[in-house]
Image: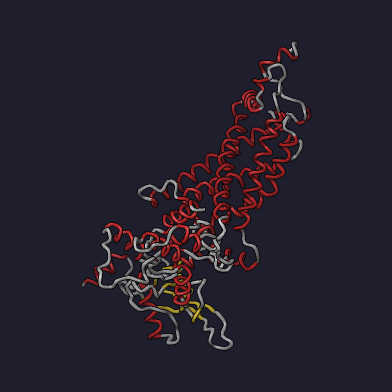
Amino acid sequence: MKSLLEERVRKSRIPARLDLIQSLSGLALGLFMWVHLILVSSILLGKDTMLAVTRLLEASFLRPDVPGGYPALVAGAALTIFVIFIVHAGLAMRKFPSNWKQFREMRSHIKMMHHTDTTQWWTQAVTGFVMFFLGSAHLIIIASNPDKIGPYLSADRFVTWGLWPMYLILLFAVEFHGAIGMYRLAVKWGVFDGKNPQQTRKRLKLAKKCITVFFISLGLASFVAYVKIGIEHRDHAGERYVPTAELHLENPSH
Amino acid sequence: MSDKIQIQANGNGPGRKLKFNILRYNPQLAGDKPRMVTYEVEEAAGMTIFIALNEIREKQEPSLQFDFVCRAGICGSCGMVINGRPDLACRTLTAKFPSGEITLLPLPAFELIGDLSVNTGKFMRAMSERIGSWIHSSDADNRDLTILEERMDPDLADEIYELDRCVECGCCISACGTKRMRDEFLGAVGFMHVARFHMDSRDHRSDDDWYEVIGDDDGVFGCMTLLGCEDNCPKDLPHQTQIAFLRRSMVKVA
């Protein structure tokens, strides 16, 4: 029998798994955030559309008797995302500069190189750090108020609750971090390399730019829409939106 | 005659005054402090940074330290930071810089010998020992030297040769933000050597063996895909695809 000293000590397989989990959790969050913004931007098609989307996600079609469906589904989704978010943040944190010397080295390197992929790593680190706090705050608000999503209630959060600066910062942080991250994932694992990886990388960079512009524009337009509704609805903050189709049932005098 | 044609072709007439800002520091001299010194050189047709440096040393500053051997991009000795980017001095034309102002720094992440001269040799030797940068064959000890070596598929030989073009100049190391932050990180030149021996049919190391070499955060999982290596390699080696390949291979055996 081999003694412990003779037995070959294998390197831990954990770093490989952590690397993969960091990438997969990032991929999941990135895809989720794109879908999330598209759903949020339904407000641009009108309050009724936004409410219809909200009710669909609350699975209200399973419960036609009450408006509102199962808000617990929303809370569940928010908590699931929160778990993935914490895992991703914990793993990505390992890459941050951990002391002043590393911080200084990286800053001077970025300043010296003027190299896009390096500079954008810094953008990701900063936006990631911002999201530790604001992303958590947003997720906790949604998970603890899953039934308070709707054209008026969401708009009230922007204006009456005064959270518009948080949403504005989150929009930029998420869109930059996500698009850069998705591009980096593609080149990191070489998933779309094909026969000409350099050409592919150029295309991915262009796609990243277009995606960023598209989602930030969509996000800003939605932001303006919610703030506008929030200001108009300020005096009735907390009241729910009644869809146009149900108006005559609620209040026949209208 | 041919000189005249070249002058017209590169668009810069003779006699343009070039300003070289060079970091001067000799760690061997007691009390010496790092400082930037400016030298003026008259541009000549087809002038490279290497030619200009020799002129400065011959006519203005005999104590200026920098390395070179081949002046043809083969020896990898004259790597330095040229206007923010690591590159080979002998392969960089002064005509590339329309402003005529050129700042030269020694490659960071290496031990400084003096001025622009750094000890890449010491680093490369340690790197080679760390990854076992030679053929590891299971029958190496009892090889019959009277028998001809097994034939290698010419396509494979070409592929190996493509990666073997590395001249160990150190530009990828200095261009790497990860390496700047974390001293123990292997860096692109190391991964390129691993990829080269991984590909070699005479090397009998399995992926499990390679995992022992690069399967941690100082190895391939530490790479943050900033791609400074890919974008600043004077030999245009495919760092991005090879590191992605190693990452995938190492995750598969984890």
Residue B238 in the image: above or below residue A206:
below
In the figure, residue B197 lies in which quadrant?
Answer: bottom left
> Is residue A62 or residue B228 the one in the foreground?
A62
Left-right relation of B1 to A91: left
x, y percentage for residue B35? 54, 79
> Is residue A201 or residue A212 the one in the foreground?
A201
Residue A219 is at least partly visible in this image: yes
x, y percentage for residue B221? 53, 57
Q: Residue at x 66, y 35 (%)?
A: A77
In the figure, residue A140 lies in which quadrant?
Answer: top right
The N terminus of chain B sits in image quarter: bottom left
Q: Residue at x 50, y 57 (%)?
A: B226
Q: Residue at x 56, y 38 (%)?
A: A34
> Is residue A143 or residue B251 the one in the foreground?
B251
Residue B178 in the image: above or below residue A24:
below
Furthest residue toward top: A252
